[in-house]
Amino acid sequence: MASNTTVPPRAELLASLRSSGAEVTRSVRSIPAADFERGRYENGWNARQILAHIASIEWTYARLVDVARQARSVPLPADEGNIEPAHRAPRSDNLSYNERQVAKRADASIAELIEEFERNRAATIRAIEEADDETLAAIVRSAFGYEGSLAQVIHLVAVDHTLVHLRDIVEG
């Protein structure tokens, strides 16, 4: 799955990461506790489980920055256009991974999940702030197959993907 070809400028990407992160925490904090247990998602996840998913995958975005940075220091063969994390697995394995991560957080409170998301989002923002322009322009592939510049992919998965799940939580 290819993303569009426009590379978002660092300032725009950082602003989107900050605003979407704030939107997640603000919206989630406004939901009554009982509403988190209602089923809302196609695989039967309720709002608390969707929040656990958002919190659990956020750490991978800072890791993707590291992968792009490391790959730039090791020349790729001419026929390889993508930098793939070592942990990349087939889509079915990623779905299984998501299920395991949500299950690990079955006893976490909403406050703990929000705290995990905020901590991981802060790490994503720091990683983008510290990445040079070449790293942000490096071609990467996310675990679910989204390809493009690192900046594009981070925007797609850390901003757009997260906001889709936030709508799942809020609109139920």
Image (cartoon, rainbow, N blue to C red):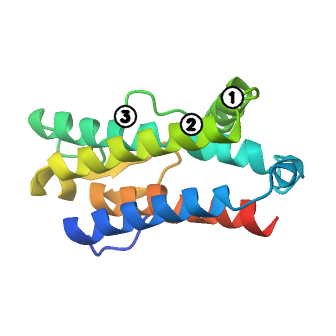
Disc 1 marks which residue?
Answer: 105
Whether residue 133 sits left or right of residue 67 in the image: it is left
Disc 2 versus disc 3: distance between alpha carbons?
A: 17 Å
Tell me the amino acid under the disc marked 1: Arg
Q: Which mark is residue 56?
A: 2
Instruction: Find residue 112 and report its image quarter.
Output: top right
Q: If you read the primary sequence from the N terminus, does the residue marked by circle 2 or circle 3 appear first?
A: 2
Disc 3 marks which residue?
Answer: 85
Q: If you read the primary sequence from the N terminus, does the residue marked by circle 3 or circle 1 appear first?
A: 3
Residue 94 percent coordinates (x, y): 61, 36
Discs 2, 3 touching: Cβ within 8 Å: no
Nearer the camera: disc 3 or disc 1: 1
Residue 29 percent coordinates (x, y): 65, 56
Tell me the amino acid under the disc marked 3: Pro
Q: Is residue 157 above or below residue 120?
A: below
Q: Is residue 40 above or below residue 56?
A: below
Using a 10 Å C-alpha cutoff, classify the residue at mark 2 as few (fewer than 14 neighbours), some (14 to 19) or many (20 or more). Answer: many
SS type, badge 3:
loop
Instruction: Find residue 167 and report its image quarter.
Output: bottom right
Which sits in the foreground, 113 or 163? 113
Which sits in the foreground, 41 or 68? 41
SS type, badge 1:
loop
Q: Residue at x 21, y 65 (%)?
A: 10
Disc 3 versus disc 1: distance between alpha carbons?
A: 24 Å
Q: Is residue 96 above or below residue 27?
A: above
